Image: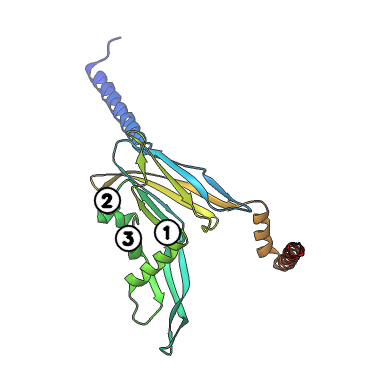
């Protein structure tokens, strides 16, 4: 049976609309999946003898460009004692200073100089670089005439010396047109936590795409058991700590005594 012109036009219109919706959905799906990111290993286990861990961060992009990788913890308040001259004579700890909010761990890696490959507004929006991090931080306490820039740099210096903060430009490399890689050493000083790992594809100083994953750091084995005991059964933990210290002391004494007898 022949269709009328009106029915044919309606059905043709419905077909074009359906095709357009499917095409939009496919384009949107492609854009979401255009960039991916993996960390190997994705879990770090803290056990006896733990001294940090070597990690490999890999990913793919939809097109060539620059890549920035950021690893950070949840933000929190960080409190420290600061030194000053007591009575204008002796250097000693004279007060408290608090930074908030700050991440306990903050690490950035990139294919090039961050200030050159990404514009200032987007660095600030995504907290990429120490300058953008400083703008987020409030400092309370400290000396009466507090120089925020100076004291923030002191925080960064302290964190860098403990391996918890770093910005390493030129450490991300492309292994092919759209595959990148970054090899890092995870510091043993970083506490057990879930750390957010983010990768940004940058072109013409703008972020085109991003991907993220989670790096899990947790205690296992006897380290986990002792930690649970320290918080759950502090009295038992204290007795065990004393016993272990005594045994260790006796063992050391026997070693030295035996060495001196020869």
- Residue, far top: 1
Q: Mark 2 Cα within 10 Å, few/some/many (few <14, many 20+)?
A: many
Contact flag, marks 1 and 2 (Cβ < 8 Å): no
Residue 169 point in image, percent of width and height:
34, 50
Give me the C-alpha separation between circle 2 and circle 3.
Answer: 12 Å
> Which secondary structure lies at badge 3?
helix
Q: Which residue is mark 2?
A: 118
Q: What residue appears at the point 24 percent right and 15 percent down from the top-left corner? A: 4
Residue 151 point in image, percent of width and height:
37, 72
- Label for residue 117? none
Q: Nearer the viewer, residue 91 or 133?
A: 91
171, above or below 62, in the image? below
> Which secondary structure lies at badge 1?
strand
Classify the position of the C terminus by image quarter: bottom right
Residue 101 point in image, percent of width and height:
42, 65
**Which badge, 1 or 3, is on the more N-terminal residue?**
3
Q: What residue appears at the point 30 percent right and 36 percent down from the top-left corner? A: 63
Quadrant assignment, res 31: top left
Q: With 9 as the anchor, is 31 left or right in this view?
A: right
Classify the position of the N terminus by image quarter: top left
- Label for residue 165? 1
Q: What residue appears at the point 68 percent right and 56 percent down from the top-left corner? A: 225
Q: With 242 as the anchor, is 16 left or right in this view?
A: left
Q: With 93 as the anchor, is 23 left or right in this view?
A: left
Q: With 47 as the anchor, is 151 left or right in this view?
A: left
Q: Nearer the viewer, residue 167 or 234?
A: 167
């Amino acid at each position: 049976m022949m269709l009328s012109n009106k029915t044919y036009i309606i059905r043709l219109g419905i077909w074009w609309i359906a095709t357009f919706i499917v095409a939009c959905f496919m384009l949107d799906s492609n854009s979401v999946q255009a960039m991916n990111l993996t960390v190997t290993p994705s879990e770090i286990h803290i056990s006896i003898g733990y001294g940090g861990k070597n990690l490999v961060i890999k990913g793919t992009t939809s097109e060539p460009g620059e890549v920035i990788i950021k690893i950070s913890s949840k933000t929190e308040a960080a409190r420290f004692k600061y030194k000053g001259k007591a009575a204008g004579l002796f250097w000693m700890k004279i007060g408290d200073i608090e930074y908030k909010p700050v991440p306990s761990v903050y690490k950035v890696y990139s294919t090039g100089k961050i200030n050159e490959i990404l514009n200032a507004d987007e660095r600030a929006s995504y907290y990429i670089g120490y300058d953008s991090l400083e703008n987020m931080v409030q400092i309370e306490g400290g000396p009466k005439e507090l120089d925020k820039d100076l004291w923030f740099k002191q925080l960064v210096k302290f964190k860098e010396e403990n391996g918890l903060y770093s910005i390493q430009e030129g450490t991300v490399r492309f292994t092919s047109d759209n595959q990148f890689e970054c090899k890092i050493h995870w510091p043993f000083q970083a506490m057990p936590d879930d750390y957010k790992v983010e990768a940004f594809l940058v072109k013409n100083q703008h972020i085109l795409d991003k991907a993220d994953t989670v790096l899990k750091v947790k205690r296992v084995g006897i380290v986990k058991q002792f930690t649970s005991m320290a918080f759950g059964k502090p009295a038992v933990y204290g007795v065990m700590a004393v016993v272990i210290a005594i045994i260790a002391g006796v063992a050391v004494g026997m070693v030295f005594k035996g060495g001196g007898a020869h």
